[in-house]
Amino acid sequence: MAALLRRACVLLAACLGFSATAGAADPHGNFAVRGVGLETCGTFTAERPKQAAFHQLTLSWLNGYLSAYNQIAPDTYDVTAAASLDNLDARLADYCAANPDQSLAFAAIAVASVLDPARIKARPGAPATEPQVDSGTLQRIQQALKARGHYTGTVDGKFGPGTRSALEAFQRDAGLPVTRVPDALTLARLFQ
């Protein structure tokens, strides 16, 4: 567990723009945190039911943290192992409910440490053709695509041709790789 926490601290330092040198902190294990990571779990817990900008910003920040974890952590292709955004939100909410005074930076470390044992260690052979998200997340994706003018169908949480075409249009407009699925990069940009 200590090695995992050390790896998470190295990653956190790297995500925040600090050198990932031995210890990734000062000699006492201290390091600076910026942005949403400075907020407390209590703030997240209070704002989460509103599904407002702070909640979405926090989930985007968590996705960024986990994406950097994927890049830096040894033997890691995807620490989320295809967990949906709703699942990540629930994990963060559970941790924050139990630790309201903890910073979101350390909550992200805790979420990553829980996810790490089930991580995907190597890139799968073929690209995904169907999304690995639940219907609630898919509804939020459809709503976001509709708000941006890319989706005209019913917000039903079903992955059909209309959703696939809307994702393709959004990815092209945003200058993203066109995968036609709600991959991590697309979701991060969509929920900015």
Image (tube, rainbow, N blue to C red):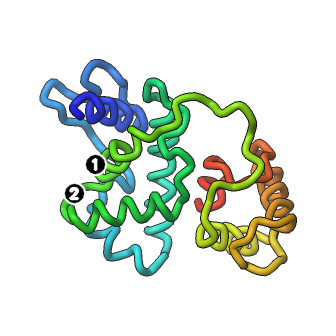
**In this rendering, position of residue 39 left or right of residue 81:** left
Residue beneath disc 1? 106
At label 2, the amino acid type is Gln
Q: Single out the residue that lies furthest toward the top.
A: 22
Tell whether 9 sits left or right of 49. left
Question: Which residue is under mark 2?
Answer: 102
- SS for tag 1? helix
- Of residues 66 and 24, the one nearer the viewer is 66
Q: Which mark is residue 48?
A: none
- Residue lying at the far left of the rendered structure: 28
Residue 118 appears at what percent x and percent y? 44, 41
Q: Image point 45% across, 58% down: which residue?
A: 88
Where is residue 184 drawn, in percent x and y?
61, 49
Residue at image coords 33%, 30%:
7
Residue at 50%, 66% (x, y): give it.
Answer: 56
Label 2 and label 1: CA atoms lie apart by 7 Å
Query: Height in image: 139 above or below 107?
Result: below
- The answer to whether 50 is drawn above or below residue 176 in the figure is below
Return the x and y of residue 79 as percentages of the image width and height: 48, 40
18 horizontally vs 86: left or right? left
Q: Is residue 4 visible?
A: yes
